[in-house]
Image: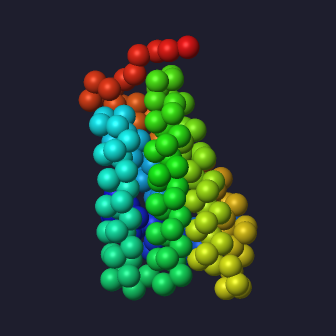
């Protein structure tokens, strides 16, 4: 988890264009990690993993000399969105296998993007609103793409939920 956060904190500082940074492609992996933990052992473990990722991610970002605004924004956005993802996932965990990770990731990605880009880049002269919009679109697409590895992982672990209506 911490490695994905650090990688994302570095990559978000490099815009691809006015609509997108490289961090949008790596950050959604954090939701995959907590969703698998949540499915495997429940929200308590998922929250512990999120908090460890938060502490390690911020510490590593500061050690790697990531801009302080990016480190603070990342930490705040990360822990709020992870805890939100865990809560949404847990509410939907008994539904069809894909609903909890997809909806949790989409809701959390939206909040994460709002918190992160407004703290990290507001007032810097960078086109943070368009960067945030572009990153959110990629994060939402990644939420769909990451359903395949999520299903494969929980299937291999024998954690597929029983169908409920």
Is residue 108 visible to the viewer in this orientation of the structure? yes
**What x and y, as percent, mark residue 42?**
34, 37
**What x and y, as percent, mark residue 109?**
58, 53
Q: Residue at x 48, y 84 (%)?
A: 68
Q: Residue at x 67, y 68 (%)?
A: 131
Q: Nearer the viewer, residue 145 or 94?
A: 94
Is residue 11 visible to the viewer in this orientation of the structure? no
Q: Quarter holding the C terminus?
A: top right
Q: Quarter holding the N terminus?
A: bottom left
> Colour mode?
rainbow
Q: Nearer the viewer, residue 161 or 15?
A: 161
Q: Residue at x 36, y 34 (%)?
A: 39
Q: Residue at x 41, y 16 (%)?
A: 162
**What x and y, as percent, mark residue 126?**
68, 80
Count of numbered circles on the image? 0
**What x and y, as percent, mark residue 124?**
67, 85
- Vertically, is 45 above or below 16? above
Residue at the front extreme, as displayed: 44
- Vertically, is 73 above or below 25? below
Left or right: 53 with respect to 104? left
The quarter of the picture where residue 104 lies is top right
Residue at the left extreme, as displayed: 157
């Amino acid at each position: 988890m911490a490695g994905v956060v650090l990688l994302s904190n570095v990559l978000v500082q490099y815009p691809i264009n006015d609509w997108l940074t490289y961090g949008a492609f790596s950050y959604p992996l954090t939701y995959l990690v907590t969703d698998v933990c949540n499915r495997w052992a429940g929200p308590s473990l998922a929250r512990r993993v999120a908090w460890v990722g938060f502490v390690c991610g911020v510490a590593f970002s500061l050690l790697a000399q990531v801009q302080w605004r990016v480190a603070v924004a990342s930490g705040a956005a990360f822990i709020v969105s992870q805890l939100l993802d865990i809560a949404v996932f847990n509410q939907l965990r008994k539904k069809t296998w894909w609903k909890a990770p997809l909806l949790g990731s989409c809701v959390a990605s939206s909040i994460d993007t709002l918190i992160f880009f407004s703290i990290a880049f507001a007032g810097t002269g960078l086109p943070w609103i368009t960067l945030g919009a572009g990153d959110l679109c990629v994060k939402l697409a990644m939420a769909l793409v990451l359903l395949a590895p999520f299903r494969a992982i929980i299937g291999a672990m024998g954690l597929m939920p029983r169908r409920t209506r």
